[in-house]
Image (spheres, rainbow, N blue to C red):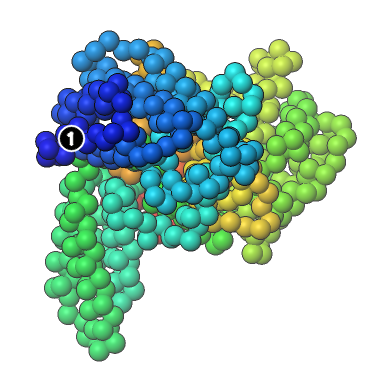
């Protein structure tokens, strides 16, 4: 808890009228009252905002800015009242905070607009707040975000201009900062620590590849990752065991001794640094949701796989494509589905499509259903490119397998031919309703609308994990889905799966993956119907799904692997996806 005296009413100068002095005192009292109910980080942020606004209210200001500060104070009061309602201390008023934000936005836009049009007046104001008064910047951003839904088009447009400028300023500032160099007070998660530790273990294994203790530590780390059993306590135990094991090693060659000593020193330094990060109490869900460490990690893992895809994964996807082509030949509605797919892709192409080998020829024609089917069959039958973009062959083909399956279902539904619906698609839909949707709890289309360049699942206000000049700008699904289901009282209901994601540092992108369900049901169908010309392991199919969906900006590793794990026991015969056994877990991560 913060010391009590730090929450005293801010000093009031001559510029502060009695009504606002009373409001500031009420806010300070509210922060004290909410102390036992909110994380310490929230109280710190509230105190910083209160101090900032008190300082501005006590300084000389033009009447238009004094009016804006008064509206900001009312918004602060609404925040306190909402916190008191969430703690059960007062009756909830679901519209109060939104109304206060919109009122502050209106007055703020008028104040800034006095200096000229939005494009000229907002940049100096935003830049000054970003450099000198972050709490004022945060308050303005919350209000401007609400203002984008006001009835006045002029106010909406001005708010949109300001929000876009703020995003650009933040992006420019973040691009020069690598994820590992972010501020030390950014909360670490169990996954973040585990990734750091795993990298150090592998660094030492390159020096001592035959060491049994290091192999065991590596497998423990892999099991924690794959089984989603990470916790701060488990990672701390692994850190201690890794440190003890490394110190106990006795290298045999001088060169090895220098490299091993450096690795041990680095591990000890990291363990010391991490000692302050091992408690996750008080970390707000919103900050865990942003989780730039986890988002960058997942994005770069997928990019590394695409740059050098494992041969078993490429062979599995090629075999599935050949089997899928044989099934399409027997489907009388396949041509209509192919035509619909090509239209969809031309209307909404994904960012990576211009760089994917062979796709331009698939999307180039705009003729009838039969011609579209022939182009799709030719694409499925062509040998996979073995050049630098061979990983995009995997992405493009997995995307086609999933979305052509969905198009087949849409065509059957539109033509009112339920018997033509592929059985595997119906089974996947049933399992979505039964297994995935109840635990998804997401609010779609709630994030920023717009397009941007970049690769992976970083959010719109974060710098992209990587970029490719050949990729077009697109809107990524990870931007537009918030975790949690809105409730009538203004709160949000989070499923146990989202709780696991946030608690363990697994990034939330769009919720549990329906595309993974479709792909695995298609794989089981092709296998059981004898349409696969060679043995294919479900783990390779699952890894291909993860590569595709993360690179496209739609899902995280957790959201793909969790669905695969749950479906493994429900499809008959079982998929055989690696579980928690030592033998399977030791083999599968080596492919990653």
Q: Position of residue 220 (x, y in %)?
A: 25, 54
Mark 1 nearby-residue class (10 Å; few <14, some 14–19, many ≥20): many
Q: Residue at x 22, y 57 (%)?
A: 274
Q: Position of residue 252 (x, y in %)?
A: 22, 85
- Taking depth in this image into account, of 337 and 552 the one nearest to the observer is 552
Number of marks drawn? 1
Q: Residue at x 29, y 72 (%)?
A: 204
Outermost residue to the bottom: 254
Side of 422 where 544 appears, left or right: left
- Taking depth in this image into account, of 367 and 421 the one nearest to the observer is 367
Q: Is residue 553 above or below residue 207?
A: above
Side of 235 where 4 appears, left or right: left
Q: Is residue 485 above or below residue 280?
A: above
Side of 568 where 403 appears, left or right: right
Q: Is residue 204 visible?
A: yes
Which residue is tagged 1? 7
- Taking depth in this image into account, of 241 and 587 the one nearest to the observer is 241
Q: Position of residue 310 (x, y in %)?
A: 52, 59
């Amino acid at each position: 808890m913060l010391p009590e005296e730090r929450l005293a009413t801010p000093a009031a100068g001559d510029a502060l009228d009695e009504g606002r002095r009373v409001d500031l005192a009420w806010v300070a009292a509210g922060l004290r009252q909410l102390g036992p109910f909110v994380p310490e980080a929230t109280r710190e942020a509230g105190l910083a905002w209160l101090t900032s606004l008190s300082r501005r209210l006590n300084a000389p200001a033009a009447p238009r800015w004094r009016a804006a500060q008064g509206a900001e104070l009312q918004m602060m009061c609404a925040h306190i009242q909402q916190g008191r309602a969430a703690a059960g201390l007062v009756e909830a008023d679901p519209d109060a905070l939104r109304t206060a934000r919109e009122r502050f936005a209106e007055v703020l836009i008028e104040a800034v607009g006095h200096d000229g049009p939005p494009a000229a007046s907002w940049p100096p104001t935003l830049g000054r707040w970003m450099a000198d008064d972050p709490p004022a910047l945060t308050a303005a951003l919350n209000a401007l975000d609400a203002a984008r839904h006001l009835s006045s088009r002029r106010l909406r447009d001005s708010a949109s201009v300001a929000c876009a400028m703020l995003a650009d300023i933040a992006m420019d500032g973040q691009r020069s900062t690598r994820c590992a160099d972010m501020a030390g007070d950014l909360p670490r998660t169990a996954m973040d620590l585990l990734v750091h530790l795993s990298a150090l273990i592998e660094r030492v294994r390159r020096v001592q590849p035959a060491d049994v203790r290091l192999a065991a530590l590596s497998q423990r780390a892999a099991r924690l990752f794959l089984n989603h059993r990470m916790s701060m306590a488990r990672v701390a135990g692994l850190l201690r065991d890794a440190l003890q094991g490394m110190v106990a090693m006795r290298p045999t060659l001088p060169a090895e001794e220098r490299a091993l000593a450096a690795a041990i020193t680095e591990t000890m330094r990291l363990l010391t640094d991490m000692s302050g990060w091992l408690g996750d109490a008080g970390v707000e869900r919103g900050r865990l949701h942003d989780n730039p460490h986890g988002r960058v990690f997942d994005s770069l893992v997928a990019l590394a796989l695409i740059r050098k895809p494992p041969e078993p994964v490429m062979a599995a996807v090629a075999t599935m494509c050949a089997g899928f082509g044989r099934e399409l030949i027997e489907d009388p509605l396949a041509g209509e589905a192919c035509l619909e797919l090509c239209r969809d892709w031309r209307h909404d192409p994904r960012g990576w499509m211009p760089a994917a080998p062979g796709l331009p020829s698939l999307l180039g024609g705009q003729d009838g259903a039969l011609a579209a089917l022939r182009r799709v069959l030719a694409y499925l039958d062509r040998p996979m490119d073995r050049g630098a973009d061979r990983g995009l062959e995997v992405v493009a083909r997995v995307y086609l397998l999933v979305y052509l399956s969905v198009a087949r279902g849409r065509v059957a539904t539109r033509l009112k031919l339920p018997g033509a619906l592929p059985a595997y698609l119906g089974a996947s839909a049933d399992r979505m309703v039964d297994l995935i949707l109840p635990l998804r709890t997401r609010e779609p289309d709630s994030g920023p609308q717009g397009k941007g360049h970049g690769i992976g699942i970083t959010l719109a206000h974060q710098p992209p994990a990587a970029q490719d000049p050949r990729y077009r700008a697109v809107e990524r699904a990870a931007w537009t889905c918030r975790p949690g289901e809105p409730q009538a009282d203004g709160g949000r209901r989070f499923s146990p799966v989202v709780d696991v994601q946030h608690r363990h540092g697994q990034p939330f992108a769009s919720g549990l993956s329906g595309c993974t369900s479709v792909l695995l049901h298609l794989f089981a169908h092709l296998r059981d119907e004898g349409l696969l010309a060679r043995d294919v392991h479900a783990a390779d199919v699952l890894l291909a799904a993860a590569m595709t969906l993360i690179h496209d900006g739609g899902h995280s590793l957790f959201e793909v692997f969790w669905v695969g794990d749950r479906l493994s026991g429900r499809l008959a015969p079982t998929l055989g996806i690696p579980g928690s056994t030592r033998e399977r877990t030791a083999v599968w991560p080596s492919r990653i």
